[in-house]
Image (cartoon, rainbow, N blue to C red):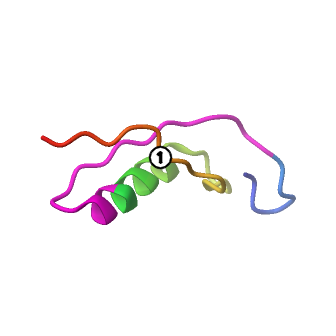
Amino acid sequence: MRISDNTAHGFVQGYGNAKTQPDAWKAAIKNANDQMSTGYRAKHCTKKTIKRG
């Protein structure tokens, strides 16, 4: 979502690795936000798959 006028940019997939599920979720959200253009951020995030490694 664009922060200034709340318009959607599109879909981005984020991936995260960590020792706990909540930390991996935070890392995935950060990864998705890092892929966005300046002025945009992830708004509606859903977990699709969680893999144990």
What residue did someone put label 1 on? Answer: 47
State the residue in front, 15 or 40: 15
Say which residue appears at 73% left-offset and 40% top-offset.
Answer: 9
Say which residue appears at 45% left-offset and 55% top-offset.
Answer: 29
Say which residue appears at 46% left-offset and 50% top-offset.
Answer: 34
Start-end of magenta stretch: 8-24
Rendered view: 10 above or below 34: above
Q: Position of residue 52 (x, y in %)?
A: 18, 43
- In magenta segment, residue 11: yes
| Rendered-image quadrant of the C terminus | top left
Q: Position of residue 11 (x, y in %)?
A: 63, 34
Q: Is residue 7 left or right of residue 42?
A: right
Q: Residue lying at the far right in this picture: please name it.
A: 5
Q: Is residue 39 left or right of residue 33?
A: right
Badge 1 density bin: few <14, some 14–19, many ≥20, Cα 10 Å: few
Amino acid at pointer 1: Lys
- In magenta segment, residue 16: yes
